[in-house]
Image (cartoon, rainbow, N blue to C red):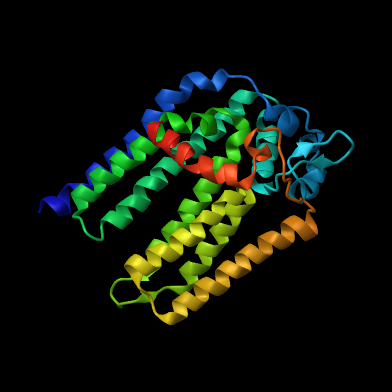
């Protein structure tokens, strides 16, 4: 009786809190100015001023090179598209860009709630899965490690790729037909690959959703061989399309060295530094 009557109300309360808490927490940052890469990607980017140049924005890097073209080492057209849309609405008012970014962060937090809830519901009752999912999403939303992604407009790609990756993973989760053992909905897998691809266009780090998806399938869903084949073909196709757009269409190469110490270190030094980096993240 309790599980039938209480959870919907509890779920709505949790979602409402997940929306309100980060808004209250980050409202004071909305008046912050543009900073650092914001100038090259937004303030001094003449391409954002002219809607006719949108095709160039979507097939180039993100920085205005100052010679009538876009340049840089990033191929993140979804991030560039967000800058373009925000500029058309707000002009060069950084508050508008920050409102958009905070909205995305809240949306991502709510998605974390639903994804974790879907996973936990495999083994926990509705109330427990709700509560633990709420705590997980709340920690995600308010953790200090998230500050840069929320208040630094140049990091909008972080939130966008996470948003698309979570939507993709949610489609993977709902693709399972629990009434038919090992049965997976193919059309929902199509949406999984569509949103994975959009995530890659926001930031290449979105590629992590593919090994995570394969691991989840292997551990929990245990689908038939046809599903594995679809996943393999879809993953190769998604990555192939991204590689083609980046290197053949947009001609955005990979920059080997940046102006950072770690980029100038040898591979051995980098590998030896990994344990320290992980430790520092855990401390944070």
- The residue lying at 34 percent from left, 66 percent from top is 219
Report whether 57 appears left or right of 1: right
Regarding residue 58, the answer to whether it shows in the image is: yes
- The residue lying at 78 percent from left, 50 percent from top is 55
Residue 165, how many percent across, how many down? 50, 53
Please tell me which residue lies in front, 279 or 31: 279
Hey, which residue is sitting farthest right in the picture? 67
Report whether 174 appears left or right of 192: left
Quadrant housing residue 241: bottom right
Residue 83, how many percent across, how many down? 67, 37
Please tell me which residue lies in front, 127 or 64: 64
For residue 224, above or below residue 120: below
Please tell me which residue lies in front, 14 or 138: 138
- The residue lying at 53 percent from left, 30 percent from top is 148
For residue 246, above or below residue 83: below
- The residue lying at 39 percent from left, 46 percent from top is 112
For residue 24, above or below residue 50: above
Viewport quadrant of the N terminus: bottom left
Residue 28, how many percent across, how many down? 48, 18
Hey, which residue is sitting farthest left in the picture? 1
Residue 249, how many percent across, how many down? 79, 58
Count of all numbered marks drawn on residues in the image: 0
Report whether 199 appears left or right of 77: left
């Amino acid at each position: 009786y309790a599980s039938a009557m209480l959870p919907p109300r509890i779920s709505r309360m949790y979602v409402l809190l997940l929306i309100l808490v980060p808004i209250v927490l980050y409202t004071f940052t909305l008046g912050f100015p543009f900073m650092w890469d914001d100038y090259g990607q937004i303030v001094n980017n003449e391409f954002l001023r002219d809607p006719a140049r949108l095709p160039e924005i979507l097939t180039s890097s993100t920085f205005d090179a100052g010679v009538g073209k876009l340049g840089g080492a990033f191929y993140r057209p979804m991030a560039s598209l967000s800058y373009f849309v925000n500029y058309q609405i707000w002009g060069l008012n950084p508050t508008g860009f920050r409102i958009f970014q905070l909205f995305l962060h809240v949306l991502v937090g709510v998605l974390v709630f639903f994804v974790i809830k879907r996973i936990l519901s495999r083994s926990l009752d509705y109330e427990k899965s709700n509560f633990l999912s709420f705590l997980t999403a709340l920690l995600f939303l308010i953790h200090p490690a998230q500050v840069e992604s929320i208040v630094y407009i140049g990091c909008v790609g972080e939130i966008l790729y996470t948003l698309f990756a979570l939507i993709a993973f949610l489609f993977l989760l709902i693709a399972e037909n629990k009434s038919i053992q090992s049965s997976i909905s193919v059309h929902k897998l199509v949406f999984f690959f569509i949103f994975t691809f959009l995530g890659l266009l926001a930031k290449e780090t979105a590629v992590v959703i593919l090994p995570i998806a394969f691991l989840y399938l292997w551990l929990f869903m245990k689908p038939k061989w046809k599903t594995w084949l679809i996943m393999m073909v879809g993953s190769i196709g998604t990555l192939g399309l991204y590689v083609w757009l980046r290197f053949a269409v947009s001609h955005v190469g990979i920059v080997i060295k940046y102006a950072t110490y770690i980029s100038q270190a040898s591979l051995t030094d980098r590998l030896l530094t990994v344990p320290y980096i992980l430790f520092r993240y855990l401390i944070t």
